[in-house]
Amino acid sequence: MSAVRPGTGKASGKTLTGDEDFDGLDRVEPTLPGSTYYDPAWYEHELDRIFYREWLYLCHGSTMAKPRSFRTFKIGSQRILLVRGEDGQLRGFHNTCRHRGSILCKEAQGRLTGKAIRCPYHQWAYSMEGDLLATSSLAEAADFDKADFPLYPVHVQEWRGLVFVCLGDDAPDLRDSFERGSDRIEHWPVEDLVVGYTWRKVMKCNWKTFWDNFNECLHCPNIHPELCDLVPIYGRRISGQRDDPHWQDTAESGDPRFVGGLKEGAQSWTSDGVALREPFPNLTPEEIARGQSYFISAPSVFIACHVDYMRSVRLLPLGPEETEIEVEWLFLPETMERPDFDLSKVTDFAILVMQQDAEASELNQEGMRSRRFTEGVLMPEEHWLKRFQDWVRERTDQ
């Protein structure tokens, strides 16, 4: 088992004694079985036990702010419709007509032309609250009651401008899904931000493959050289100070290679490290100095929080080896109105990193198809990855 030599990222040949006070793993741990990343039956099991029961992030509420706005989404095999009513309330439904099951809204997003959701097949009409208003039949049977055929609802919560849905019959507490604590973003004005840019990509990998990649930085120096320049500690193949078994030796150095944070002089995740604006007003000195914080709600989203903007990264499964990633860049409206606002400074850098992660995940996905590969092994730095995989195990009874 190899440790990391501070500052080089090269294997040192040292062996852990078991007495180290650090966050890493101190014994060999197996990964999830390789087949769980491509087996169709297991994929359906994960959909049922995870994606059809947990809260899932879909979008920022500003993307459908006006009454009668709608958006549609696909989660596994399930198609979902979100509609904002005249009362300003967001409601969610299965995108399925109660007549014979047709899709109700074909478009990805838009605004209803009237106050009804109308099926494009046989023209059944529903209110924005989901009640059946009218059928297209010349007459209805005496025992037909429109009240018996509302749209199938899904749970929706709009938390600080972030829109979550749950497809389960009984939704758990939303805040229980916030993996590293919602207090991580309490000082960011999430509800006041708007989407300035959206980027989407369909990756040829299982949804867990991308999350595995997110949860470790052993890959960072060779996959993300540009990111390692901005966040020097990543160049040592670790994501946090206490990932190093000997972190105490450099704890007082102040060098971002050892204590984390952005490189000296950098303020934010931009192509030149310069923030687009002054820091959000309620951030603490520590949050400003760190330059990046993360909010996570598995299995669907992580949000990167910077001093001048936020970036949500949403993952939804489309198949055993196909995952959609959607990234939203969130800004204060006045930031985008500044004459010196340069969107590409923000988006180009993050898209580069996302593309690199996607290519690495697809490479990983292909390799796991080997008949000889039954499971892998986790190294000491991959403790967050183990935590994520244990989360999956708990929900799938592994």
Image: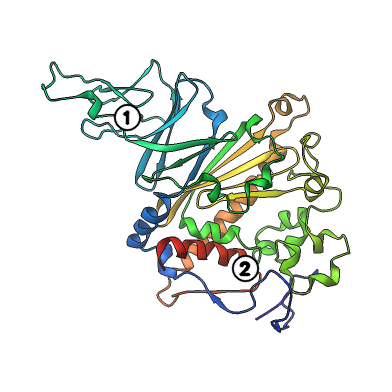
- Of residues 249 and 132, the one nearer the viewer is 132
Locate residue 207, reporting x and y percent.
Answer: 47, 55
The structure residue drawn at horizontal position 51% and vertical position 71%, both measured from the top left corner, is 31
- Identified at 85% across, 68% down, the residue is 250
Q: Is residue 105 above or below residue 249?
A: above
Q: Considering only vertical position in the picture, is 70 above or below 381?
A: above
**Residue at position x 73%, y 77% from top?**
20
| 192 left or right, relative to 76 | right
* Label ID, residue 42: none
Q: Which image quadrant is residue 193 in?
A: top right
Mark 2 vs 1: CB contact within 8 A:
no
- Residue 255 in the image: state x and y as whole percent: 86, 60
Pick whichever, 277 or 28, lies toward us.
28
Q: What is the residue that sits farthest to the left in this orientation?
A: 142
Within 10 Å of disc 2 (Cα), the crowding (few <14, some 14-19, many 20+) is many
Q: At numbered mark 2, what does the secondary structure look like: helix, strand or loop?
A: loop
Q: Tag 2: residue type?
A: Glu
Q: Quadrant of the C terminus?
A: bottom left
Quadrant occupied by the N terminus = bottom right
Which numbered disc, 2 or 1, marks the residue that appears first in the sequence?
A: 1
| Mark pair 2, 1: CA separation | 44 Å
Q: Nearer the viewer, residue 39 or 340?
A: 39
**Residue labelled with disc 1:** 104
- At x 76%, y 25%, the residue is 338
- Amino acid on which the number 1 mark rests in the picture: Leu
Dot 1: element: loop
Residue topped by disc 2: 382
Residue 214 coordinates in the image, percent (x, y): 60, 57
Image coordinates for residue 141, horizontal then vertical, percent: 11, 22
